[in-house]
């Protein structure tokens, strides 16, 4: 590490960029609703590309719409050190989930330019398409295709609740890029992200040195009963798909509690048809999200769900089709890269502690093809995926400085 420079970001400029980006999709409650592949997503991409070009980067867009802004290295034949995150949000998302990682990566480039520091490896700022998996499931689908977890045509074929297709929407916003998705060497990947939980803030710790990410499984359940009149249909003759779904929701919650203290079990999405107050629902679409830091416990949760769903359906006079659409095991990040994050925090005199990620991130997939690590900073009240999501400017600056140190250490100062 070059000692003769105050290797630091411009925190005020970083905060300004975050606030500017947060205006795109800003909600009345102070959050951000910038769903992937919408016109708002296009606006955020356009702004990001403009800023990266202003910082002297060349832009590549791949066929899943992920954007890579490249700063040349003195030896440009070397594989890039990649750093980034995502700009898409949840429908009631916040200003910082994803955007902090992308803006901090851009700030890193801007700061290296200001300090006239050249690195041996090229550096690429990565903005991954559809990390959230809210509009198009599964989550992290573009980084997943990049590492070969999903075929490209699977990613492009995903549809939203209105039947709109990922590949068509990508074309519509003008980001169906020409570049192949993945299949190229990456020297390392780093991602700065808010913790999205309460641990760091409650402990008064500046930086989370992320060693692992929890395993995750997503399911879709299609429940079929019989639509009938809410008035004349006797209780004993009903095949109520929504009652069946309610029982499954209760069972999912019990599975989570049954694997305490580290399990997470959530039914986040439910669509009842015909969704009319005086019709007994004949069809329900329900999602299940399981997380756990131990793969065998996650497998037990899976087995319990597969046993209970048909049992509950039979008891409710319905049928239920359960499909697992997404699974990644517990991810261990690269010890050398994790060490550079830890060393960066130490050199900067920032309090830090090891931490697991309960959330999935693009870094989880990138860890399959390149040495990868993450930097966490606290968020207020541990709240995220909520319009109230908030951080302090000094937390953003601290995280970005650790990111800068780890990336420069990896890319090598020329
Ligand atoms: O679901 C997650 O953990 C992330 O927000 N995609
Ligand atoms: Mn995120
Ligand atoms: Mn998120």
Image: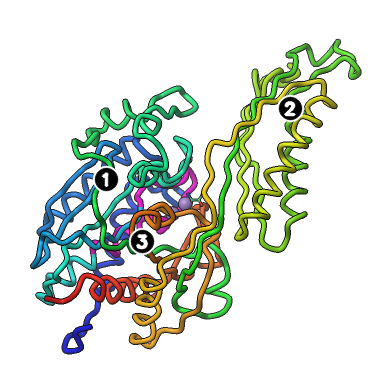
Which residue is located at x 34 percent, y 80 percent?
Answer: 344
Among numbered discs 3 and 2, the one appearing first in the sequence: 3
Q: Looking at the image, is mark 1 or mark 3 nearer the viewer?
A: 1
Q: Position of residue 142 (x, y in %)?
A: 36, 42
Q: Is residue 27 left or right of residue 174?
A: right
Q: Decide which of tag 1 and tag 3 comes sooner along the chain.
A: 3
Q: Position of residue 143 (x, y in %)?
A: 36, 47
Q: Residue at image x 44%, y 68%?
A: 376
> Where's the C terminus, which quadrant?
bottom left
What secondary structure is found at the residue carrying circle 3? helix
Instruction: Answer above or below: position of 3 versus 253.
Output: below
Q: Quadrant of the rendered structure where residue 103 is?
A: bottom left
Q: Start and end of the magenta stretch?
A: 86-106
Q: In this view, does 252 lie above or below 201?
A: above
User: Circle 1 sits on which residue?
Assistant: 183
Q: Residue at the location (20% across, 88% down)?
A: 3
Query: Residue 100 got which mark?
Result: 3
Relative horizontal placement of residue 54, taking residue 139 as reference (left or right): left
Q: How far apart are marks 3 and 2 (CA)?
A: 39 Å
Q: Is residue 167 magenta?
A: no
Relative to 342, residue 326 above or below: above
- Residue 180 coordinates in the image, percent (x, y): 23, 39
Q: Mark 2 points at which residue?
A: 242
């Amino acid at each position: 590490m070059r000692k003769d420079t105050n290797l630091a970001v411009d925190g005020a400029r970083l905060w300004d960029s975050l606030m500017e980006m947060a205006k795109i999709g800003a909600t009345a409650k102070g959050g951000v609703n910038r769903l992937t592949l919408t016109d708002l997503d296009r606006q955020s991409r356009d702004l990001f590309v403009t800023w990266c070009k202003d910082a002297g980067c060349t832009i590549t867009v791949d066929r899943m719409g992920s954007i890579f802004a490249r700063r040349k290295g003195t030896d440009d034949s070397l594989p890039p050190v990649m750093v980034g995150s995502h700009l898409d949000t949840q429908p009631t998302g916040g200003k910082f989930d994803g955007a902090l990682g992308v803006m901090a990566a851009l700030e890193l480039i801007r700061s290296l330019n200001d300090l006239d520091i050249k690195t041996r490896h090229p550096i690429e700022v990565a903005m991954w398409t559809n990390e959230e998996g809210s509009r198009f499931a599964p989550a992290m689908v573009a980084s997943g295709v990049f590492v070969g977890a999903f075929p490209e045509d699977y990613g492009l074929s995903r549809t939203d609740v209105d039947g709109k297709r990922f590949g068509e929407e990508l074309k519509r916003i003008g980001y169906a890029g020409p570049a192949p998705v993945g299949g190229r060497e990456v020297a390392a990947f780093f991602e700065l992200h808010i913790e999205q939980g309460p641990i760091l803030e409650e402990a008064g710790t500046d930086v989370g040195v992320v060693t692992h990410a929890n395993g995750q499984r997503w399911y879709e359940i299609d429940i079929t009963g019989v639509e009938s009149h809410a008035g004349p249909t006797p209780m004993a003759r009903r095949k109520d798909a929504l009652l069946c779904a309610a029982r499954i929701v209760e069972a999912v919650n019990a599975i989570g509690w049954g694997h305490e203290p580290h399990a997470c079990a959530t039914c986040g999405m439910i669509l009842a048809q015909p969704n009319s107050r005086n019709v007994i629902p004949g069809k329900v679409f329900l999602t299940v999200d399981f997380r756990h830091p131990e793969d065998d416990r996650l497998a037990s949760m899976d087995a319990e769900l597969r046993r209970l769903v048909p049992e509950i359906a039979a008891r409710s006079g319905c049928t239920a089709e359960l499909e697992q659409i997404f699974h990644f095991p517990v991810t261990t990040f690269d010890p050398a890269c994790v060490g550079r994050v830890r060393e960066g925090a130490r050199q900067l005199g920032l309090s830090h502690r090891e931490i697991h990620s309960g959330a999935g991130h693009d870094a989880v997939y990138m860890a399959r093809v390149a040495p990868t690590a993450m930097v966490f900073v606290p968020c207020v009240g541990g709240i995220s995926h909520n319009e109230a999501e908030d951080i302090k400017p000094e937390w953003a600056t601290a995280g970005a400085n650790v990111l800068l140190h780890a990336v420069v250490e990896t890319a090598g100062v020329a």
